[in-house]
Every structure is written in structure tokens, then in C-alpha cells.
Image (cartoon, rainbow, N blue to C red):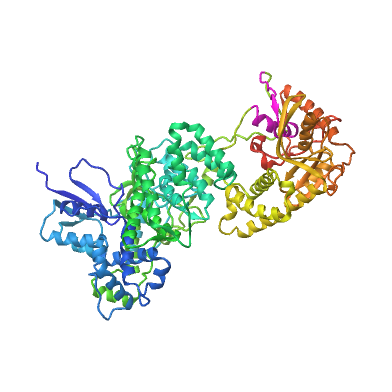
Amino acid sequence: MAFAGQRITFGLSLDGQRSTQPGNTLGESVVGPLGLLNILETQLGLLSLHPSQAERVVQYRDCLAQLDSDARFYHRSFVIDPLGTAACLLDWRDQWFVHGWNGTVAEAAPRRLRDMAEVEALARELVASGIGQRLAAIEERLRVRKTDIAEIRLVDAVDAFPVRWQLVLAQLPVVAFVMPAGEGGGFLGALQLALKSIAAGSQPEKIEWQDDASVIVVRSETRALAAQWLAPLLDRENPTLLLSGADGARLDSALSAAGRPRQGFKEASAFRPALQILPLALELLWNPLNYYAMVQFLTHPVCPVPGYARRKLAEKVADAPGIGGPYWQKTLADIEAHYGAERFPDVREAIAAWIEQPRYPAEDGAPLDTVIARVERLADFFRVRLGEADVARRLSFHAGFAQCKACLDSLQGLKRQGMGRIRPRQLQKLVTQATANGSDNPLWPAEVGAELMATQPGAAIEPIARVVWWQLVMPHLPGSDPWSASELRALAAAGALIPDAARRLDQVAKDWLRPVMAAREQLILVLPPPDEEVHPLWQMICAVVEAPQVKTLESLLASGDESMVPVATVPLPAARRWWQLPNEVSVALRQQESFSSLELMLFNPYHWLLRYPAKLRPSRIVNLGGDFRMLGNLAHGLVERFFLHTDALAMSGAEFNAWFASAFAQIVDEEGALLRMPGRGADLENFRFRLHRSMERLREQIAGAGVVKVIPEHEVSGHFTGGDLAGSADLVMQNARGEHAIVDMKWAGIKKFPEKLKKNRHLQLAIYAELLRQQTGSWPAVAYYILDRAELFAPDERIFPDAKTVASESGENTAQLWQRFLATWQWRVAQVKAGQFEIVMDGIAATDESAPPDDAMEMEVLNAAYNDYRSLAGWGERA
């Protein structure tokens, strides 16, 4: 049998829908406006490559710029945001053309329309065709050439289509499509009749609710519970049309978890990983550098910097925000050691191109050539990955490449128009336009056995046993037009017959009824959570039904409804003071310890157990930390740099001030550049003032103590009963008499650290003092220096006569504290050998076994904020 031409079902809401039963047919299609447009252009020889909307915006911007003057209605907006203004006015122009505009207006037309018509005289030559102009070309070609279309079954009334579509359809073999008229029985049938009466303009009497399961309305406090309830109901025994009003991806997740086929709800997003890297890469062009964007760029799964290199750089930037300096060079050296001499040059070039490239003041903008080169480089990164074997990754790379290509076309268009520089806001706008609606999730396609699916109620055009409307939320309603009544009359005179808001609302209201009329046996409506506004369809149902019944899923769960499968609760491990390891499990002591490890072993043994013997590692997610740690590191680093100068102790005040100004700026750029970011000027100056005052006061303390030698970050090592012991003392000083002192610098803690001296708990200083004693033969003096308050605290005046003296209440000294440490260590070692580990945290009551021996140290509760394992200590009430 000869093929008689295509038979097409055509409707305004049918693009991208899967709402009709597949049949054993040839040459039949179900399409919306974009689908039919493609068919007609293909058959008429009009198919061509159309530029992106972003590129069309750039083209239209050129037209606006050429005619711009103070007299133009768009002038003030265009000066502030040229691309945004061009996008808005291009949208107006496209709407007018699809509704029949001829590109001109009468001389007496309102000013805005006259300006638009003058711009159009340029735009018709410079701006790529929109849909309205493509339809006009199709209409003209149809006058001289036939298509291979036997029949177009029109789902919507002809007058529901814009004028350009009406003119095209007038030249095609159009027949009316028979829509479902409501064939349900029981309460469903009664509801369908009542809603049809409302649609016809009459007001029927309210009908009584019937609980015959033909109409089910449910609501849940959460979408997650609603999805779990719905998943088991979807089976192939009852053909179903699943309409998603919102959050279809959540429903697909629940279906997948329940072992049901995914429906393939396509929720386009601009935040897919492959689409995020371009805006991040362009954000790094500006000075001062956005270090939050830098960390996001380096930790992004799609990044043009090789994996190990970007992870190491991200860790450095998160720990010490900045580029350059010793820390940066050490990181580069680690990267070179990892990649080797053969691969490192390429990696180093990538780091230079993406991270160390020149930056530009936002107010001046960046050279357009530089931006183009950066986008071209990223496009090349995606281009070489377009053949990726993994389907999901390949689709992701295609989306990223398309975004870069659209952005690149727009940038090159701006360059052709004579633009030399581009500012951040303009670039962000251009990237947004190039990204459009984003891309679909390539990991969630429809699976075999999926139901019929629609995201538009107007796509419900065939009768089906069951219709499920998931999340009946308030839709986007047609709004008012931005044009005055006089402008609309002038547009109508120029051929643009734009329907008013009431007519558009009437059309969408007819679409809302289609899913109800399509159901033959059952209609299931899943309402949104109570705090969200419901769909107008539900309001229409409430208007015709007396006391409609809504089942609350939480109540079904409580009542033991068969459709709700109970899940047995499993309690979380309860908090307890002691852990006991099985007899067959033993923990070996470490050969070398440090203050950090010993502090955990003494004061919170379970933390020591998980960190060292168990080797549990916290998440590798890299985040920029807070100011507290960064300021402390900067202060320590600057003090260290100062005392590394051979003439540090001989500097005059003027020489120190000159050195400080230069060194402070350098270390902030290298390790504290967050303080350079917009809005941080006051923080930077406050920190500069406090640190300068603190270092001046430290110099005074050193001079008053007669110190002749200062060694910063002095490595000390030795041994103790448990093995080797090592650490790094912040400052080791020596006076003219040969006496030594150890100063531990803290950024803050004006109450905490004097209290340690008072209670003789300064364990870190005691450990370093003992290690130095093993090297020198005598106990050094110890002190704390609180940097942000410029205060030096010492237990006596032996070395520092100007320090604030905080004597020990017990009268014991540092040497005696060391002996107490050894006793405490022996006590904890006995527990470790017995497999017992104490959890010392606020809220977990101590036991008799928690009390240390009389000759041991008093126990402390460490700050839980620095405990990565606090959630493993147990849950529930801690008592």
C-alpha cells in the first residue's frame, strides 16, 4: 500500500510530551509548535542553522545602539544594561511578529512603537529570524510548493493560535481532533459533567461527594511522603497518564527507589555541573579576585585544571586564600612531584592560564579579546570530550560545549560591533542568555515500562483509564501586557492581533479541564503541602462539589492503611561515657607523639582512637574557613617573617614601620586575600591596625627582656616514657645571660590562656619546655602572647619583667606539670591496653572511672567545634 503522506496531530501544548498511546502506524506524528515548524521547514527546503537567542540579543543590541539617543524611549535603560534592554525589546518584537506584525506602524502611533519600527528597519537586515518571521517564510513558500502532509488534526481551535500560525494552517489540510468529552462513571462522571457546565458558562448545583474510588484526592505535609504513597499505585495493569504539575524529578526518584520505571520528567536546570564552569571561569577575571568562586572552580567536577593539581590548589586557597608566596610555591612543587617532568609543563600551563592569569578592575571591564580567548579555551576543553563513551557524561559535555559556543558567538558579535571591553554585569547577562533554560539531567531518562507522561495539562488529548495529577500547584498565569491600550490598537492596525489577558486565561482554563475529561475510570489528584497555593482546577472542583474529601497521607500512615508500608524504626546508638573494644581487638600505641595527639589521648580518648588508630578521615570537601583561623595564621606568619630577618632585633621604629607596610600587603595577597574582596575594607584596616600594634608591643617586650636571639617556629624534639616526641614552638628566645624562653602565640583567648597558667594546665608549653630542656639542660621560661590584645602573660618575671604575671594557684611550676602529664599518660595507657576509651563531652555524665589519679592532671573538656567525630559519640539525651 502506498504511503499517503504524514498525518499530524498538532496542539499548542504537545511539544516534548509523551501523552498519547503509541500505535502500530507509519507516518503519524504528535507535535507542538516547534515540532511542526521543523517539519514544515524541512519539507519546504527552509531548514537552516539558527543562531542562539543570546546571539540574536547581541545583534539586536547593535541595532538599538546605532539609533540610540536621548530621545529614544529605551535610552536610560540601555545605558545601564544594554544586553538586558536588548533582550526585553527583542522579546517584544518576536511576540509582535508571531501575532502578525508587519514591521511598521503609522506615523500617528505612540512614541515607543515608532522607535521600535525605526529599529526594525535595521533589525530586519541584522537580526536573525525569530519564529514569527520563519512562519512568514513558510506561509510564502506554501503558496508555490506543497508539503507531504495528508492531514493535520488540530487539537486547539484555530483562533487559539497566533496570527502567523493561523495563516500557515489556512494553507494546510486541517481537520478537527476529537477531544475526550468525559466518559467516566460514578462520581468521576458526575464531576466531569459539572465541570463541563462551568466551562459552558452555567452554574450547576453542587454535587455530593461519593467515595467510590473513581476520584481520589490526597495531600501530605511533604512531597517525599506523597511520592512514596503514589509509587506503588503506578503499574501496567491500569494505563495511566501521569501529569506533573511540579517537582517531577522528586517523583521519579521515589519511583526508582520503589523499583518502578522512571518517567523521565525533564526539568531543565542552569545549574547542571557542565553549565556551571563557564560562569565560574569568567568570574576569575576580576580584581579583587572572588576566592569563593576560585574554590568552587577548583573543586568543580568539570574543571579544565587536572584533578590532583586542582585539589591541591583548592586546599591551599581554602587554608590560606591568596596566590603566590612560599605556600603557593610549595603547593606547585608538590604538584610537580606528582605529575613528573614529562606531564608537569602542561599542568603548569593550565594553572597559569586559568588561575594566575591577569585580572581586571570591574569598573573598567576586561578586554574582549581576553574574554573570547578564555571562552574558546573552555570550548576546546569540552570539544575534545564530545566523544566520551559514557552517555551521561557525553550529553553533559555537549551541553557545556553548546553553552560556550553560544557565548562565544555573542562575544564575537560584540567584537564585530566595535566593543573593546566588557564589564562583569554585561558578561553575566550574556552568559545567562547563552545558558537559556539550562539542560536536562542526563542521568534520569524515561525507562522501559514508563507511563504516559505530560507536564502540560493541555497535552491530555486521549481518553485513558486513569489520570494522576501530581502536585496540583498554582501554575504560571497569563499576566498583563507591558503595552498601553493605544499601543495595542496601533499594533493591531499594523497586523499584530495580540489577544488580551482575559482571552489567554480562558484558553489555559480550557486546558486545565483536559486531564479530568481524559480519565475514564479514575482521577487521582495529589495536592501540594498545605502551605502552598493550590491550582485553580481544585478551586473549580470545590465550587461544584459539596464538602470534597481530601485524604491526609499522614493519617493513613497512622491508621495502618494497607497502601502505606510501615518501616521499622532503628534507634541511633545512645550516648555513653565509655567504649569497650572486643577482647580480640587491640590498639597499638604510636611510636611518635605530638602535643596535638597527646591532648586528644589525655582529654578525649575516643577522639584519639578514631583519628589515629582507626584513621577515620573527615570529608575532603574543601570550603573557605572563617576569619578567626585565617587572621591567626596571618598574624603568626607575619611574626615569623619578621624574626627571620637577621636584623629584626636591631630595627628602628621607622624601619619596622616600612617593613611592616610592605610585608603585611604581601602576606595578605598570598594568604589572606579574602580581606581584599569587596566589602572587607574595614576588616582589613582593623586587622592591619591590631597586628601592627601587637607586633610593636611584642618588640617592646623583647627589648625589655634583653632578648638577643629569637627563633620563630623552632623545631623541638626528644623523647618521653611513651617514645619519641616532637613539635614546633612559635618563638624560642634567648637573653644575654643565656637563659631561654618559649612564647606560644595565640590570636585570641585573653581569658582562656591566663586561666591555663593560673590552673597550671599549660600542657603545650610544658611539652615544648621539656623538649628544649632535653637539648639545653635547663628548664626555659614560658609565656603566652595574645596577639589581638597585644598582651604577654607569664607565670613569673624570670625572663619578661613587663609581662602580666599569672602565678599558679597550686604553687606548682612547669616541671611539676610535666610530671603530672606523665602520670596522666600512664593512666590512659592502661585504659588503652584494656580496650577502654572515654568519651569526654558536655552532657555525657562522668563515671567513677573518669576520675584521674591524684598525681595526674585535672581533666578538661575540649572544644567540640574542633571534633570531627562528635556525631559518632552517640545520640539521644546526654545525661
Question: Tag count in the figure?
Answer: 0
The residue that appears at 18% across and 59% down in the rendered structure is 138
Judge whether residue 597 is colored magenta: yes
Look at the picture and state if 480 lies above or below 667. below
- In which image quadrant can residue 424 be found? bottom left
- Quarter of the picture containing the C terminus is top right
Q: Is residue 385 left or right of residue 36?
A: right
Is there any visible trace of residue 544 in the rendered image? no
User: Does residue 261 appear to the left or right of 681 in the view shown?
Assistant: left
Q: Position of residue 436 (x, y in %)?
A: 37, 54
Query: Which of the 4 image quarters holds residue 871?
Result: top right
Task: Give the residues in magenta.
Answer: 584-613
Whether residue 91 appears in magenta in the rendering, the answer is no
- Say left or right for 49 vs 630: left
Q: Is residue 117 above or below residue 868?
A: below
Q: Residue furthest bottom?
A: 108
Which of the pair 144/674 is nearer the observer?
674
Task: Give the quarter of the image for residue 797.
Answer: top right
Q: Is residue 352 left or right of residue 49?
A: right
What is the quadrant of the N terminus in the image? Answer: top left
Residue 734 makes an appearance in the image: yes
Give x and y (percent) for residue 333: 53, 36
Determine the residue located farthest toward the top in the rendered image. Answer: 584
- Residue 152: % across, % down: 19, 54
In x, y percent, where is residue 102? Answer: 22, 70
